[in-house]
Structure formats: structure tokens, C-alpha cells
Image (cartoon, rainbow, N blue to C red):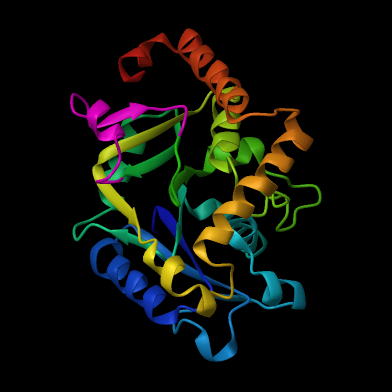
Amino acid sequence: MKSFATIILNRNLPKITDKLYEHLVKHDSKETDIYVLEAGSEKHKLSKYCTWYANDEEIKKQGLRYNRGMNYALLQLWKEKKWEQYDAFFLITNDTELSSTQTLAPMKKLLQEHQRVGILSPSSLRWGENILLQASSIKYFWFIHNNALLLRRTFIENIMETKKPDYFNFVFDGSNFRGYFSESELIAKAYANNWAAAITSEVFAEENESYLLNKADLIKTENYDENIKLYIEEGQQWLKSKYGFNSRWSMQQYVKSFYDSFFDFYPEYKKYKL
């Protein structure tokens, strides 16, 4: 039985998705089953490895984006009675580019060694966080911005919606359509429930932004500049409505307060604190 379920989110970029799928099969098939969610793709632009096809009228028009898409796919595993067979879920978008070597075997080892890590993120070669990871290949962070996250199942079970689950609420907040500060919200929930969020430099994942820059018309989304503008404008409205925060700084301090408290309860992990 595989330890992980990998979920790839696709929208109208089948060749890119297929390449990522085949990379995982080549390097990580011993560790993971791989599922592809088509988020309102056109019928002739489905990945040949498509697992689920979300294609109601709203999804075909808007897509699902990360929050709704990952909710949809995770909920499918829950409904199909496959949930408990996995120890963790690796959530990635199809513009993720992984290193040429194994990704999940090193992350599996880290989860085994760090029993309180609920969220594990690969680093990026371009991140300044690598400076902080020089002395140790893993550190516990209170801020991560990545489209490649490994979530421990027992952590998710602390926070997921089970009474009336749908793709708006199962794990992520689907009302936050473009995902503004959604990683921070997830990290706050982790530390509030005695789980840590970590970044490791043992594996790397890069986001290829050229797809959004050059293929926005195929993805059927706004161009890069318009997407960033809406990401901030809509995200700030969501942040104020849900938390009453009027600045990124307030959200960051909210998350960090849980982060600092975690080490009061688990002082044995202070060597991994920033």
C-alpha cells in the first residue's frame, strides 16, 4: 500500500499535466498513488491520466483554483473510502516542476522523524528561506507560500468539515477563491492544533509562472497582471470579512502568535524554530 496520495490540479493544459504525472511515476511511484483533477477543462484538453472531471457550468466557467480544487479532490478520496489508506496528501498544481530525483521518499522520512509536522513544503531554489536552512535541512516556519504542500492525514482530520462537506469547505476556505493568504490560514490552524509547518531543502519544487504568463487564454483565466490585481483586491476583502484584519501584517502576527505558543508546549522542537 502506498503511503501518499498525490493530487495534480489541471485546467486545459494536458501535456504539462501529463509530463508532471509521468515524472512522479518515474521517480516516486513506490511512495504514491497519483490522481488528476480536471477543473472544468474542455473535453479535448483532458489529461490522459484524468481521474475526476469536475465539469458543472460554474466550474467550467470559473475553474476551481487551488482551494476549491484540492477540496474537491480530497473529498472524492473521502467519498470513495480511500482516505484512511494514506498517511499524507501531496497537493500540487500542474505548473509545479520537481527536481529530477525522488521527491516523496525524502519527505516521507522527514514526516517519520518529525511526528508533529502536519504541513511539509519543499523549498525553492529561488527562496531566501534557503539561507535559514543551511545549518539544518528542515526548519519550522510560520509563513509558507507554495503550490506544493504535503499534508499529514491526521492533521487534516483535526480541521476538516465532515458534517456537510463540499468543495467550498472540506479543508480549505473555498470562498477565498484565489487563495490569498490561504497557506497562512492553514498554518495557523496547524499550530493552533499542536501541529507544525515546515520547509525542507532536501527536495525542491518550482512554480513555472510562464504558463500563466503565456497560456492564460488556454487556461481560461485572467492574464498574469489582472490575476495578481484581483488576488490582492478580492483577498483583502476576504481577509477583512472573515478576520477583521485590514493588513497583511495583522494576519502574519495572528499566525506567529500560534507559532510561538507551539514551542512553549513542545520545547523539544525549539532547535527547529527560526
**Residue 268 spot, x, y in % from top left:** 36, 12
Name the main secondary structure of what is drawn in magenta. loop
Q: Is residue 123 above or below residue 22?
A: above
Q: Residue furthest right?
A: 164
Q: Residue furthest bottom?
A: 44
**Residue 148 spot, x, y in % from top left:** 42, 51
**Does the magenta-highlighted stretch encompass residue 159?**
no
Magenta part of the protein: which range? 124-143
Q: Residue at x 75, y 53 (%)?
A: 165
Q: Is residue 1 above or below residue 187?
A: below
**Residue 223 spot, x, y in % from top left:** 53, 67
Report the quarter where the N terminus lies: bottom left
User: In this orientation, which residue lies closer to the viewer: 135 or 236?
Assistant: 236
The quadrant holding residue 168 is: bottom right
**Residue 54 spot, x, y in % from top left:** 65, 74
Q: Which residue is drawn at 52% across and 59% down?
A: 225
Q: In this view, does 125 lie above or below 177?
A: above
Q: Is residue 82 visible?
A: no
**Left or right: 146 as drawn, with respect to 167:** left
Q: Residue at x 23, y 29 (%)?
A: 131
The quadrant holding residue 55 is: bottom right
Q: Is residue 108 visible?
A: yes
User: In this orientation, which residue lies closer to the viewer: 11 or 171?
Assistant: 11
User: In this orientation, which residue lies closer to the viewer: 246 or 138?
Assistant: 246
**Left or right: 53 as drawn, with respect to 169:** left
Query: How many marks do you count on the picture?
Result: 0
Report the quarter where the C terminus lies: top left
